[in-house]
Amino acid sequence: MSVPPLQALPLELLRQRSSTKWKSYGDDVIPMFVAETDFPLAPAITAALTRAVEIGDTGYTPPRPGIDLDFAAYAERRWGWRPDPARIRWTGDVMMGVVEVLRAVTRPGDRVVVTPPVYPPFFDTVEEAGAVVELVPLLDHGDGWELDLPGIEAALAAGARSILLCNPHNPTGTVHTRDSLAGLARLAERYGATVVSDEIHAPLTHAPSVFTPFLDAAPEAAAVGYAVTSASKTYNLAGLKCAVIVTASDETAAVVRSLPWEVEWRAGLFGVIANRAAFSAESDAWLDGLLAALDENRRLLADLLAEHLPLARYRIPDAGFLAWVDVSAYGWGENPAPYIRREAGVALHHGPLFGVEGIGHVRINVGCAPEVLTEAIERIGRLARR
């Protein structure tokens, strides 16, 4: 049975929001850059936060907030994977968790593999941990992207100590296959390296693609892997600080337990409350409606580009609400986003921030009403026809 798509909030209401997406530019600009979505919160989240405000539940996050049990149940419902709650910890956000794990599993100056084009904070996070970025770009095989396992093996053989994985991948929307992730796990084990997997986009995987948690990809993954994730991207909770760090072996769990106690204290109480509500079964129908809306928009974008920007190159993503689009054929420079914002009034994410592979590219947030997406691409199309 098909699920009706979730309806985005009206623009006049969205412009009352005080978040980055709505306060970075004036009302003449359509904001489609940062990863915030335009939908109402899941009702269970609204109810949980409202109740907390009503009773003044605004204190410290408790030492056992319960999110370990909620995430384990969520992973089993949505992906058929049941992580051990005893091996799930929490922190403020995904990048905070990533940097703390990297600090624990690398030494200053160690090299960490990243796979561009990739989420810009990956580069900063590796440096914040005291390590050095080792670039092994995704392989582009013409109709999609995949991990360059031979390239990663060469980096590990040359001394790289860890891989920072984006699973699913941002900005391409690639859902890595189980075989690819298993191969990565075996390489890490062979060379005594670790894999830190950012899985924040996992709930946004579109059928027929299937998300594979890295820790569940192969037996070797349990020994080498750390997963960090949150409800924040899917349920639009970025301002409420909470993420989980998941392990699958006694050894890796001990590494996470050895992190400074402040790592867990950085999780905000409202973040925990909202994430628990998001991970509850009460929010599953809302998520299904969101996926239906995003599925329509990722396909609508293909049609709009074909009509208004026929020289653009775009592959419908396997996951998420972020579209990776090559507009280099239009001659708008290495970084087209500022020109598009200035001349068309549409704010897109800057492609080169994702690595040199992003030259001539933009990232477009399609987590909005179809009418907003249509207006944005029509504006850019008019710019192209000048």
Image (tube, rainbow, N blue to C red):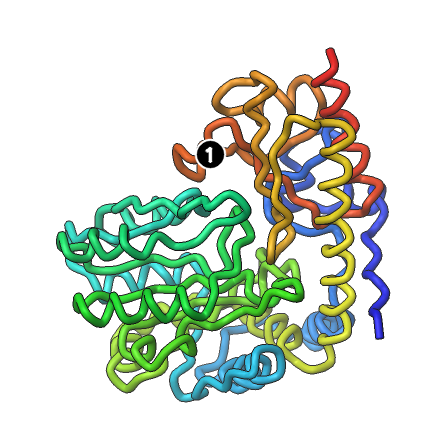
Q: Is residue 53 left or right of residue 114?
A: right
Instruction: Left or right? Give the position of 91 relative to 47.
Output: left
At 19% from the left edge and 59% from the top edge, which residue is drawn? 161
Q: Is residue 320 left or right of residue 353?
A: right
Residue 290 in percent (x, y) is at 74, 62
Q: The N terminus appears in which quarter of the rendering?
A: bottom right
What residue appears at the point 64 percent right and 48 percent down from the top-left corner? 316
Residue 349: image quadrant is top right
* Residue nearer the viewer, 156 or 199: 156
Q: Locate residue 179, reporting x and y percent.
A: 41, 69
Return the residue found at the far top: 386
In x, y percent, where is residue 358? 46, 34
Inspect this view and state whether residue 265 appears: no
- Image quadrant occupied by the C terminus: top right
The residue shown at (60%, 58%) is 319
Camera-nearest residue between 185 and 234: 185
- Counting from the top left corner in percent of width and height, residue 107 is at 15, 58
User: Alpha-carbon neighbours of circle 1 within 10 Å: few (<14), some, or many (≥20)?
Assistant: many
The residue sitting at 21% across, 52% down in the picture is: 155
- Secondary structure beneath dot 1 equals helix
Task: Residue 369: tell me if it is visible.
Answer: yes
Q: Is residue 176 left or right of residue 132?
A: right
Q: Label 1, on which residue? A: 358
Circle 1: residue type = Gly
Give the answer, above or below, for where 112 lies relative to 307.
below
